Image (cartoon, helix red, strand yellow):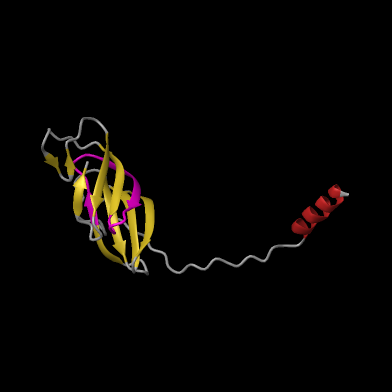
Amino acid sequence: MKYTILFIGVFYFLYFPCNAQPLVVDWQQCYGGSDYEIGYSVQKINNGFMVFSGTSSIDGQVHGNHGMGDYWLIRTDLTGNILWQKCYGGNDDEGATKMISCLDGGFLLCGETFSQTSPGEYNGDVYNNHGSADYWVVKFDSLGTVEWSK
């Protein structure tokens, strides 16, 4: 008896097609320059979005790249128009991996850096790299100003 009910249930779902709602695109946007960009995270914020990616471009919509790959942060309005954008990094390669929102309205950007520094010196935004690739965390406020980096 239970196999008959199971068979009827499966038959019903396979025989009668589902009437799903079609997806409607509110807006779409491409961001970047002539080299590579790779997206990692988009978070909804007040009146817009924060887009976190990596970039190696030095043109197009990308301004302020420190060299090779940088973390790239974009603040948009509700329809995807860029309000501001900033690159974070040093003269070598930075690989973005995650953006975390903070209670104070700012964000943490996480990833790796290959930009070398001497103890106590800066290389772009990178400070005190211990050699080769280091995990790099940058804390910034809601306007993209760096508060600290480790």
In the rendered image, which quarter is residue 121 located in? top left
In the rendered image, which quarter is residue 136 located in? top left
On the picture, is 70 further left or further right than 2? left
- Percent position (x, y) of residue 32? 31, 56
Q: Residue at x 11, y 36 (%)?
A: 120
Q: Can residue 90 be found in the magenta stretch?
A: yes
On the picture, is 121 further left or further right than 71? left
Q: Can residue 112 be found in the magenta stretch?
A: no
Nearest the camera: 46 or 14? 46
Nearest the camera: 29 or 114? 114
Q: Is residue 58 visible?
A: no
Which residues make up the magenta segment?
Answer: 86-106
In the rendered image, which quarter is residue 69 located in? top left
On the picture, is 100 further left or further right than 19? left
Q: Is residue 21 above or below residue 107?
A: below
Quadrant, the C terminus = top left
Q: Residue at x 31, y 56 (%)?
A: 103
- Percent position (x, y) of residue 66? 19, 47
Nearest the camera: 65 or 83? 83
